[in-house]
Image (spheres, grey):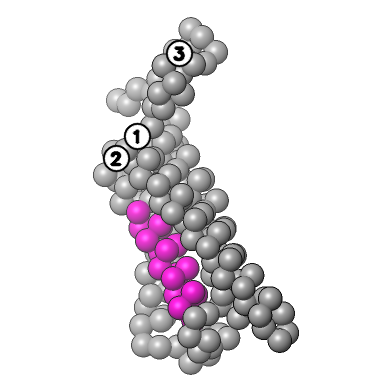
Amino acid sequence: MTPSSGALNLGADTKAVLVADAVMFLCAMLLGVWKYRQIVTSENHQAHIYVDIAHRVALMYSFALLVIATFVQLSGWSTLVNLIAAGAMAFYFFAATANYALHGYRRDTENQFRNPVRGTHGFMITLIVAEIGGWLVLVAGFLAASHRCETARSHPYETVRVSFI
């Protein structure tokens, strides 16, 4: 943000990740209300384990999305590459959270891997590839940009200018 204009200089890819982050954080807060409700109404004063897990991972994923947004903004790759990498990670963050919430709603298991439904292990493999692969793409984009970066600062609050060869 520049002091005089008040405008944010964020790429569309960064804005998309921040919107996903806002939605995930809202999900975390709503899951926290559900968790609280289960705690106060259950005999043992505990929420179902998967309601608890869904709440916790939504919180963690919301902060992970902030880190991802930072790397997207600083990446030297194209908007499309950044969106694919970050979007793959965000998709699996939301899918995993929804899956945990579904198990919490159904109260059908306390360990989804004990008797997994068809496709569970395949889903986990694609999750691992998408999340680690997406992250490595963004880190490589940051490293590529920082290697070729030229800064010009005439004022301490001026936006860093990045040139890509």
Q: Position of residue 39 (x, y in %)?
A: 67, 76
Residue type beneath disc 3 = Ser
Local SS, label 1: loop
Which of the marked residues, 2 or 3, is nearer the chain's N terminus?
3
- The reply to whether residue 141 is visible in this rendering is no
Which quarter of the rendering shows the C terminus? top left
The residue that label 2 is drawn on is 79
Residue type beneath disc 1 = Gly
**Which picture quadrant has residue 120?**
bottom left
Q: Position of residue 24 (x, y in %)?
A: 47, 56
Q: Are marks 2 and 3 in contact (CB under 8 Å)?
A: no
Q: Residue furthest bottom?
A: 115
Which of the marked residues, 3 or 1, is nearer the chain's N terminus?
3
Q: Position of residue 136 (x, y in %)?
A: 43, 51
Q: Residues within 10 Å of mark 3 (few under 14, many from 20)?
A: few
Q: Residues within 10 Å of mark 1 (few under 14, many from 20)?
A: few
- Mark 1 to mark 2: distance in Å? 8 Å
- Mark 3 to mark 1: distance in Å? 20 Å
Q: Position of residue 28 (x, y in %)?
A: 53, 60
Local SS, label 3: loop
Residue type beneath disc 2 = Thr
Q: Which mark is residue 4?
A: 3
Side of 2 relative to 46 (left or right): left
> Which segment is the magenta one?
87-103
Most frequent secondary structure within the magenta stretch: helix
